[in-house]
Each structure stands twice: as structure tokens, then as C-alpha cells.
Image: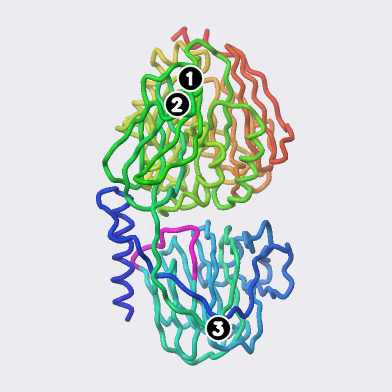
Amino acid sequence: MINNIKILFISFLLTLLSICLSQTNPTHEYTTSFQFIDLIWEDDFENNHLNHWTIYDEIPDEPSNWHVRRGYLIDDSDSGTKSKIRGTHITTGDVRWRDYVITTIVSYTDDDYIGLLFRYQDKNNYYRLLMSSQMQIIRLDKVHEGEISILDSFDEEEWPECTFTITVAALKDTLTIYLNDIEFFHVQDSQFRHGKVGFFTCSNKGLFCDYLRIYKNYQLVSIHVPLKFQTGPYLQRVLNDEAVIMWRTNYPASSCVDYSLQKTAVNALESSNRTRIHEIELSDLEPGSSYYYRIRSDSITSDWYSFTTESPNDTAFSFILYGDNQTNFLTHRDIVSAFQQHTFDFIISVGDVVQRGHSSDWNTEFFNPLAPAIKYKPVYAAIGNHELNARYFYDYYSTPDSSHENYYSFSYENCFFIFIDNPINAYPDKKFYTDISPGSPQYSWLVSQLASESARTADWLIVCGHIPCYNVSHPAPYPNNMKYLVPLFEKYGVDIYFAGHNHNYQRGFANGVTYIVSGGGGGKLSERKIYTNDIITVMHRKHHYCKIDVLGKELSFTMYDIKNQALDKLQLTSRYSERNQY
């Protein structure tokens, strides 16, 4: 049976891959789903309490953090040990429950271990569906008298989704496991015939359970899955007289954008190429003008949205900056809600927009929380270490230079922005990260950009990357950034270097360059100050974002916490005159 399941799963992944690469039409528009019979028990986690739930932490000095927030059961403790896969359990129900079917939706935003427990009799006797995207494990375990035996497993491909449905049918001596309605395991085992249900995490910072329902039985039904917009629309590269609009559909379809200065379909730009990842570039737009637009794919059409093109001679504008929103999409939503109280022109992310870049699902952590903003404002991103240099970064963004999309530059009004790819300076042993040392293509490109006329003639020269040059919190300092990048920033008169990676806020100044660390976009906050130096003078261990207002050669910088309280402010004057002496 397991060979058939593996063949089925590989076929499923290949289908996903072919759709994402936009090379084929969908093979079907029907799928198998469930019709559940006779509800026994449910919890939708809307009451903000854990009544009737029992927590057991396998490692006593590493407490879990099970809690309920906004309709989710959550553990974000990171407790447990991966070497022995020991973590924390939370269980509910009646140990006398016998035959039943469990269904739940989980959002699994970390890449370590999670599990669904069933026929749970006590902490040493139960069945467990175990998953780890990092370890590429999907496994059905039996824990008997504390000893683990593997009933079935799949370890050839990692699961591609962050948010998905788990269904477990434990009926008589048959255990059947479904992920997103696809059968994975079908096992005969009669060790445990009754027991409670629950969840498990180990070394995991992000398990969000949307609901849990228990039924007496189920039957499979065939349902039609209509074409729908899966992501977006969202804006990219609203620069000069151009704008790029992107979106994704669940099946390959045509691409069309209607746009006009009024909310009518005056202009249409379309592509008949059938794809899941849609990208339409509008050009010859009027400067400083507000355009309405909507997207169409085959028979489906979105609502109307709008964007404003760059003004040619106006040097007053604003942008939002933050980073490291990965793992906690609820906090990321709060950050977005907070910064939307301001007027701004675009958004910059300094990376780590998802916890695991190899997962195709960037909606859960990034696109869905940002959706209210990026329909109207473009987002530009520096690639982070958690993006893992995976192809999805290149698929989901449209950057100005297609020859190297992981590092790029653009001018916006009186500013010149340079985005670099520097995770290798924090993880030099990870060879899949892009080299930025002297002699590398990226380093040579960076020097050429810093020395360019666009950089020299800009009022503001701003560099964005993920790994900081100076920091006073975990992780440790990054000597290659200080060795390779700092001398360039000082030589060519960089005004500001924006970075993330440390999950907090830090500000410093050295030899004319302002250094900002803004890594408080949602990820679990880093440890408090553990280093000291003469550069970093301000630090806040808070979830936050930054707003930058540019007015000619003056720049106003404000850091806000998640409640929109201003915690740090800075006024800068352009280093334009210094740059032009080179």
C-alpha cells in the first residue's frame, strides 16, 4: 500500500510543480472530498480558553505555550528536543471514544515537528501523525509504553503547504490518514481501540489549529473545484511610467488587466498564455496619476483596485519598512493594520517573509496578511535566509533586473535604492546562498551601483539587505558584513543601511552611515541585548515597523510598535555633497 501512496503523492507533487511552472493545463477540475456523518464533538477555539484540554510537556524545564487567540489553538514555544522528537502534547475528549473521524485545519508555519494525536490513552500510549517539512517526514507512529514504532512513513518529498486539512479515520482496526483530502496511509493496527485526541509539537515556533471536529463516520464524494484567485492581485515595480500586477490562480488560466484613470474598462492588456502565476506589465502610464485596475483570468474577474504612479519632479514621498514577519501571521496582520493607518507610497521588506522558502505556500505568512495593502501599494523585498534561495522568491516577485532577481536597484524620485543578497555572511557554510565577497559577481555589481551616476546624483542612497552589519543581540555579529560591506558604504556615502534578521529593533551610526535593524514583523522576538558596542545606541525588543518620510534632502524616520506608539525618531540630512566628491 505504501508504494501506491508514494506514487500517488509524487504524482500530486508533480502536478503542483507543473502548474506552478505554468506549462500545462490542469488535468482535472474535480477532487475527492468528505461528507462527514454524525458530529460527536467540536472546538472552534472562539471562546479564548482551554477548558477541557490537558497539557503534558515531555521536557519539564522547557514549558510549552499552548493558548487560544483569535479562533486558533496555538503553540509557539519552540520547546522540545529534535534528537529524540520529544515535545509537548495537548489533548481533549473522552478516553472511551472508540471509532471516530477527526478533521482539522492547521497552519504549520515553522519547519520542525508537529503531530496529530488520536486514540490517546495516556502520555505513553497513543497513535500519532508526525510531520516535519525540514526533515521531509510524514509518518504514522504508534507509541506503546513510551516506545515509538513506525507504522508507515513517507520521506521522499516535503509537504508543500503551510495551511492544510488533516483528516484521520480511526475505525475499528483501520487507520486511514488524509492530507488535503489525499490518502496517505491506510494501516491495519488494533493495539489501541479507543482514546482521546490532541496535538503535538516539538521545537516548533508556529502551530495554529483552526478547529477540531470529531465525527462517527464519513464517506468520500467527488466535488467540482472552480477556478479562483489564489493570491492577489498585488503590485510590483510601480516605477516611472510602469506598473507590474501579479496574481495566482489555482489552475492555469489566461491573464488580463483592465485599467483606466476611471473605474471603467478603457484599456486592457492580456496574455493568452495559460499560467498559474500571472504577471502583466503596464507601461506608458501618466506620471503622478491614480489608476484603477482589475484582473481577469478566463471567466473570473476581480473587484476594482487602484495604484498611483511615481511623480516625476516631486521629492516628497513615504514608505514603510519592516522584516522577519515569518511564523506568526496573526502578529503580521496586526503590523499591517497598524501601518495602514498612515499614508505611504510603497513597502520594503528586509526579508524572511516566510519560515521555509521551499514551501510553495507563501500565502499563509506573507501574502494573506499583506493583502489589504499590496493591492494598492507595491512591495519590494530583500531576500532573507529563510527564503533559502528557493525558486518561489523568483516566481512570486518581479524585480527590475531579470538576470539576477535576488539583487537589484531602482531609482524612485530623488532616492536610489540598492537591494543586496547577503544571507551567506551569516551562514558561510550554506553554499546555496549567493556569494557577496570581493571578486564575486554580486560584489562587482554592488560596487558598480554605488559608483553609478544614479547613486551619485540621488539625494538619498539607501541599501537594503537581510543580515545586519552591526547588532547587539542574538545571533552573533557578522564579520564578513563589516569586512566587505561597511567599507563600501562608507566610501560611497551610503545614507542608510536597512536590515533585519534580528527579531527586534536596533539603530546605530558609524562614519556617516545610519544602520537600522527592523526585524520585528511577526517572528518570535530575539533575546535581549547580549553584546555591547559603540555603534548601536537604541534597541527595542518589540514587534514593530518603520515609516520613512522623504522631503528633498531631509528625511524623517519613525519606528512604531504594533499599537502605533512611536518609540524612536530620527531626522537625517542627505550626504549628497559627500558622494559627489568621488
Question: Is 9 located above or below residue 416 in the figure?
Answer: below
Return the x and y of residue 350 as percentages of the image width and height: 52, 36
Q: Is the C terminus in the top left, top right, bottom left or bottom right quadrant?
A: top left
Q: Is residue 159 magenta?
A: yes
Q: Nearer the viewer, residue 172 or 496?
A: 172
Q: Are marks 1 and 2 in contact (CB under 8 Å)?
A: yes
Scheme by which the image is coloured:
rainbow
Q: Position of residue 70 (x, y in %)?
A: 67, 56
Viewer-proximal residue among 227 and 362: 227
Residue 54, magenta (yes or no) = no
| Residue tagged 3 | 216
Q: Earlier in the sequence, mark 1 or mark 2?
A: 2
Q: Secondary structure at mark 2?
A: loop
Q: Secondary structure at mark 1?
A: loop
Magenta stretch: helix, strand or loop mostly: loop
Check disc 3 and give the amino acid type: Lys
Residue 573 position in % (x across, y down): 61, 14
Residue density around tag 2, few if under 14, some if 14–19, many if 20 or more, within 10 Å: many
Q: Residues within 10 Å of mark 3 (few under 14, many from 20)?
A: some
Instruction: Name the spot of residue 476 as percent of width and height, x first.
Output: 56, 44
Q: Secondary structure at mark 3?
A: strand
Pair 2/3: label in front = 3
**Mark 3 near mark 1, Cβ–Cβ under 8 Å?**
no
Crowd tier of the residue under label 1, counting other residues whose Cα lies within 10 Å: few below 14, some 14–19, many 20 or above:
many
| Magenta highlight range | 156-166
In the drawing, what numbered circle is on residue 310?
1
Residue that carries the numbered disc 2 in the rendered image? 238
**Amino acid type of disc 1?**
Glu
Examine the rendering and report whether any part of residue 436 can be seen: no
Mark 1–mark 2 distance (CA, rounded to whole Å): 7 Å
